[in-house]
Image (cartoon, grey):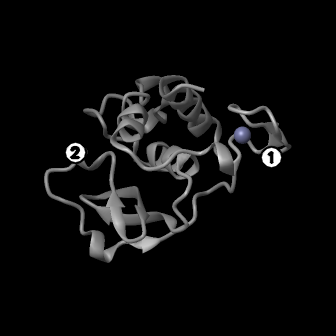
Amino acid sequence: MPVVPCIRCGRGCVFLCRPCRYPLSQALLDAVLSSLTPDLLKKQYVGLPFPGGHCYVASEALYHLLGRHPHVKAQWVWHEDVSHWFVSTDGKIIDLTAEQFDTPPLYAEANGKGFLTKYPSKRARVVIERVVEKMGV
Ligand SMILES: [Zn+2]
């Protein structure tokens, strides 16, 4: 990904520079959740009850939005026949889309796994933009 100015401070970086990220808060989590809309879903997930199909982009956006947490990790687990992503910070589980399941995911069996792209994907950037707008630039 070429250099893209930070959407908060405009410095050249890759979309959201480290000093412009957010501390973990309920407001941040709510802002991410409320930014997940059907237009962001991959075709195969369209029509699933919310928040089905949103776990990857939600986790990816949250991962890039979170600052001041040195140990933010992308996590992956196979659950109820789907690939499920969430985030952990210093061992604390943040699973924004857990409600899509009938049973709680087995977090102890999850593995740390990098996202498919190093920088925010197009869909994650849409979510990040919406969150920054909600949180206030
Ligand atoms: Zn910035």
Which of the four quarters of the rendered structure image does ligand 1 lie in? top right
Q: Which mark is residue 99?
A: 2
Q: Quadrant of residue 47 in the image?
A: top left
Kind of residue indicated by mark 1: Met
Tell me the residue that label 1 is attached to.
Answer: 1
In the image: residue 102, left or right of residue 93: left
Residue drawn at x 50%, y 31% as measured from the top left = 131
The residue located at (31%, 40%) in the rendering is: 52
- Quadrant of the rendered image containing residue 20: top right
Figure check: 51 above or below 34: below
Point 54% across, 25% down: residue: 136
Q: Earlier in the sequence, mark 1 or mark 2?
A: 1
Spot occupied by residue 80 in the image (x, y as percentages of width and height): 24, 58
Which quarter of the rendered picture does the C terminus lie within?
top right
The Cα atoms of the two marked residues, 1 and 2, are separated by 33 Å
Q: Is residue 54 left or right of residue 18?
A: left
Q: Amino acid at mark 2?
A: Glu
- Percent position of residue 38, x then y: 41, 25
The quarter of the picture where residue 115 lies is bottom right
Q: Residue at x 48, y 36 (%)?
A: 42
| Mark 1 element type | loop
**Mark 1 in CB contact with mark 2 (< 8 angstroms):** no
Q: Please tell me the numbered disc located at residue 30.
A: none
Give the left or right position of residue 96, taking residue 60 as reference. Answer: left
Question: In front here: 17 or 99?
Answer: 17
Q: Is residue 60 above or below residue 47?
A: below
**Which x, y percent locates residue 87?**
42, 58
**89 or 53, which lies in front?**
89
